[in-house]
Image (spheres, coloured by chain):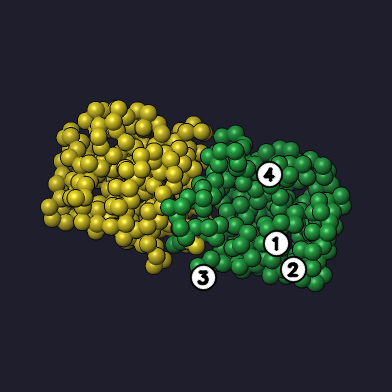
Chain colours: A green, B yellow
Amino acid sequence: MTETITILGSGNMARGIGTRAVAAGRTLQILSRDAEQAAALAAELGANITSGSVDSVPAGDIIVLAVPYNAARELVATYGAALAGKTVVDISNPINFATFDSLSVAPGTSAAEELAALAAPGVTVVKAFNTTFAGTLVEGSVAGVPLDVFVAGDSDEAKASISAFIADAGLRAIDAGPLRRARELEGFQLLIMTLQLNPAHESFNWNTAVKVLA
Amino acid sequence: MTETITILGSGNMARGIGTRAVAAGRTLQILSRDAEQAAALAAELGANITSGSVDSVPAGDIIVLAVPYNAARELVATYGAALAGKTVVDISNPINFATFDSLSVAPGTSAAEELAALAAPGVTVVKAFNTTFAGTLVEGSVAGVPLDVFVAGDSDEAKASISAFIADAGLRAIDAGPLRRARELEGFQLLIMTLQLNPAHESFNWNTAVKVLA
């Protein structure tokens, strides 16, 4: 039996991860602050996808926070113990958008660790999908090769279920170690995002992916 | 006119970058604490490569610190003003080898920035080659595609000369922004190095490269 996935959010990253969830054959629910937008995305992605507002308790065993970091904090705080027993996937890049030169979390921590600290007892946080841009997730590959998805977390069981979802979706999961490796994943994605904004890199336009080649 | 390159060190990274310098047609000097080992590497890499001990002042316009971070600090401090006017390339990954779980530099800084602070006035520090393992540099490619070499620095002129060397060597230079982006480059390479040690990643054995695909 595979887990049900609830995506919180209805923007581009929700579309990207939702597309992969459908490809992986997972049962999918989409909840958004805007229930109409959630319904529209659910209809776009396929049949039998449920939707609603974030006022509902998520049905999924896996909860994907497909919203910006500050909104993710609000959701984790508001849901509180309703997320106990579930695996919460933090995909965020907590960029300081005023400068685009640093993260908004302090050096020596990460959005993922901060969310884990904020979450109720029994909630498991996993970092994943922060290095994959939305368009590449819809596509499922880049330059003809499967996307790499770095998965960091302190629960081997939770990482295994997220990695199985990733593999079933046609992507490659890379076990990046404990949750604190989110520091390096978030830091590097800051650098990768600055490349998209740098006119020196003409071919980089939010269409790139970081791949470990061997 | 292309610059002369001096490599400080005679280990695996010196061999890798030296191989690329020869491929790029650069004039090359190799200096090491062990002058005999420097001479042996020079002979291995080709004709017309000079060598000596680190007691000599480097002849190069570009100085590659192909030694561990602590040794790089000693060299930069000892050479002092003798490096003024030169571009010093920091390739180091300041791993805390006792834990292999963090860097040995404090969060919020980087080996490259620490070396720049230690260097005499007029020395330009550029970060490059910290995400490329020695074996892949000898090969010049991985999985059939050119290696990506991330170049970070605060001098556009210095970055341009390093990037020209990289391109002439058959690799792809990626301008990663200011020298402080070395924080993210060093952090991510810590993560990449832990992957090599993780038996879950059977095919990763110090033979991988990080590539930005588009």
Chain label for disc 2: A
Q: Earlier in the sequence, mark 2 or mark 3?
A: 2
Contact flag, marks 2 and 3 (Cβ < 8 Å): no
Residue A45 image label? 2
**Residue name at image x 77 percent, y 71 percent:** A46
Which is closer to the viewer, label 2 or label 3? Answer: 2
Where B197 sits versus A94, above or below? below
Q: Quadrant of residue A28?
A: bottom right
Of B89 and B61, which appears nearest the observer? B61
Check disc 1 and report the residue beneath it. Answer: A15
Of A85 and B132, which appears nearest the observer? B132
Contact flag, marks 1 and 2 (Cβ < 8 Å): yes
Check disc 3 and report the residue beneath it. Answer: A144
Q: Is residue B36 left or right of residue B108?
A: left
Q: Earlier in the sequence, mark 4 or mark 2?
A: 2
Check disc 4 and report the residue beneath it. Answer: A69
- Whether labels 3 and 4 belong to a single chain: the reply is yes
- Under mark 2, the amino acid is Leu
Q: Residue furthest left?
A: B48
Task: Locate residue B46, reporting x and y percent.
Answer: 16, 56
